[in-house]
Amino acid sequence: LKSVKARFSSPVLPGETLETSVWADKSNPKKVLFQVRVVERDVIAISNAAVEFSDNVVISSNSKL
C-alpha cells in the first residue's frame, strides 16, 4: 500500500448500511478508485477516493465481497 486519499462528503449514522463501489483506474494500473454510499439515504459518504499500491492491481468484474 503506497497511499490512500478520500473525501468524507456526508456523515454516517449508527446502524446505516454502507455499500462500497470499487473500480480500476484505467490510466494507472497501480491505482484503485472507490466511493462509499449510504444505502438507506442514497447519499455518498466517501467520494473522490483512491488507493495506490506498489504493484499493479487486477480486479475481477464479478468480484463481490
Image: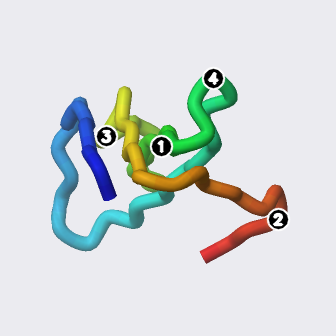
Q: Which mark is residue 46?
A: 3
Residue at image location 42% in from the left, 52% down from the top: 53
Is residue 22 positioned above or below 46 on the image?
below
Q: CA distance from mark 1 to mark 3?
A: 8 Å
Q: Residue furthest right?
A: 62
Going by the numbered disc 3, the residue's amino acid type is: Ile
Is residue 7 positioned above or below 2 on the image?
above
- Residue identified by numbered label 2: 62
Going by the numbered disc 1, the residue's amino acid type is: Phe
Which is more foreground, mark 3 or mark 2?
2
- Residue identified by numbered label 1: 34
Tags 3 and 4 in contact by the CB under 8 Å rule? no
Q: Residue furthest bottom?
A: 65
Residue at image location 63% in from the left, 41% down from the top: 24
Q: Residue furthest front?
A: 55
Q: Position of residue 28 (x, y in %)?
A: 57, 30
* Lower position in the chain sequence, tag 3 or tag 2: 3
Tags 1 and 4 in contact by the CB under 8 Å rule? no
Q: Quadrant of the C terminus?
A: bottom right
Q: Is residue 4 left or right of residue 39?
A: left
Q: CA distance from mark 2 to mark 1?
A: 16 Å
Tags 3 and 2 in contact by the CB under 8 Å rule? no
Residue at image location 17% in from the left, 68% down from the top: 14
Tags 1 and 3 in contact by the CB under 8 Å rule? yes
* Lower position in the chain sequence, tag 3 or tag 4: 4
